[in-house]
Structures are given as C-alpha cells and as structure tokens.
Image: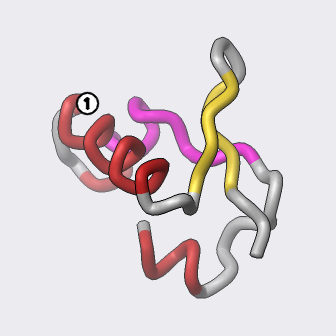
C-alpha cells in the first residue's frame, strides 16, 4: 500500500480502500487490513473521518 501511495495510485483527498476491500484484494484477514490502515495513518499518509472512512493526505 505504501508503494501504491508513493506511486500516485490515489489522489490527495481521495477515499482510501476500506479494510474489507484491502482484506479481499490482498487475501489477508480484516484485522491485518486494519493494521495497514492504522500504520499508514500513524505515518501521516492517511487521515480518518469518523463514519466516512480514510482519505489520502496531500503532499
């Protein structure tokens, strides 16, 4: 996911994949997908709006 963000797959402000979508695409558990979102948020690459999802931070 870091590579995708770095490569510009997602525009700043664009809604990021949900944990269910990440889990399905990468064939991992939802708890692993949640860890991905949390890690990206802690790195400052995503921000979360309660009830709306996670979004890509602009450069």
Q: Which residue is mark 1?
A: 30
* Magenta span of residues: 15-24
Q: How many marks?
A: 1
Tell me which secondary structure the magenta stretch mostly adopts: helix
Q: Single out the residue that lies furthest toward the bottom.
A: 7
Residue 43: quarter of image: bottom left
Q: Where's residue 11, x and y in %? A: 79, 66
Residue 58: quarter of image: bottom right
Q: Is residue 12 left or right of residue 38?
A: right
Is residue 16 one of those drawn in magenta?
A: yes
In front of the other: 46 or 20: 46
Q: Where's residue 47, x and y in %? A: 63, 43
Where is the N terminus found, in terms of image quarters? bottom left
Q: Is residue 53 above or below residue 12?
A: above
Element under disc 1? helix
Q: Residue at x 51, y 35 (%)?
A: 18
In front of the other: 23 or 46: 46
Q: Residue at x 70, y 66 (%)?
A: 10
Where is the C terminus found, in terms of image quarters? bottom right
Is residue 47 one of those drawn in magenta?
A: no
Q: Residue at x 37, y 51 (%)?
A: 25
């Amino acid at each position: 996911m870091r590579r995708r963000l770095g490569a510009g797959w997602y525009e700043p402000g664009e809604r990021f994949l949900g944990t269910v979508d990440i889990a399905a695409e990468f064939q991992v558990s939802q708890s692993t997908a949640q860890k991905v979102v949390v890690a990206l948020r802690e790195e400052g690459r995503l921000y979360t709006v309660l009830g709306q999802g996670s979004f890509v931070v602009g450069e």
